[in-house]
Image (tube, rainbow, N blue to C red):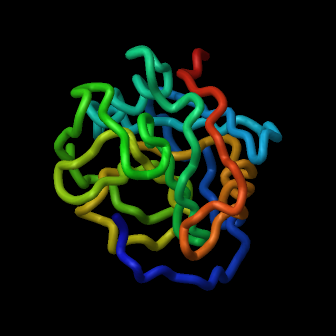
Amino acid sequence: MFASSIITKRAVPLTSRFFSSSSAVLGTKVFFDVSINSKKLDRIEFELYDDVTPKTCENFKMLCTGEKGWGYKGTPFHRIIPNFMIQGGDTDLTNGFGGKSALTGGKFDDENFVKGHNKVGLLSMANAGPNTNGSQFFITTNPDLSYLNGKHTVFGEVVKGWETVEAIEACGAMSGQPRAKVVIEESGEVKD
């Protein structure tokens, strides 16, 4: 699903490269409550780029709220590669080989590639090639993943809970196989 070339050296701590949540007013806010080996961590909150990728954002929001009777609640982060990304969202098989759109019940087309993979904390759709988006997503943990541009739709960013993202990343390996059980225990829409 991703190119095999990965930058493996991190010059500065990840948190010092993270962006400010006050950088812009974005869109819908959603959350994940995550556990590692059943230990609950602080909530991760995302703001979605509703104005840029409305279809992709609506799909993600519906999967967070579970309004179709299924979604992200109870699913694992099944692929974690340090200094690259953390991936989850397989809503049916939970092993990285499944997942379906809340919009279509199957796959949906790439919406656009307006936003690039140019900072940490971005939400992007994982896919198996052009127009194969379902429910799987990833969160970037490297600011320079430009080789993913034009292949994966960026549709939001982490605005709260960065320490939890780092804790998840620490459970990863270069193989992508998590070294701990990382689960989205709860997910939903943030109501301000």
Residue 69: x percent and y percent? Answer: 43, 15
Horizontally, residue 176 falls left or right of residue 108, namely right
Q: Residue furthest right?
A: 39
Residue 132: x percent and y percent? Answer: 22, 48
The residue lying toward the viewer, choosing from 2 and 75, is 75
The residue lying toward the viewer, choosing from 78 and 167, is 78
Residue 116: x percent and y percent? Answer: 35, 60
- The answer to whether residue 183 is above or below residue 18 is above
- The answer to whether residue 176 is above or below residue 62 is below
Horizontally, residue 128 falls left or right of residue 30, namely left
Horizontally, residue 49 falls left or right of residue 79, namely left
Residue occupying image coordinates x 42% and y 82%: 5
Horizontally, residue 99 falls left or right of residue 47, namely left
| Quadrant hosting residue 111 | top left
| Quadrant hosting residue 118 | bottom left
Q: Is residue 15 visible?
A: no
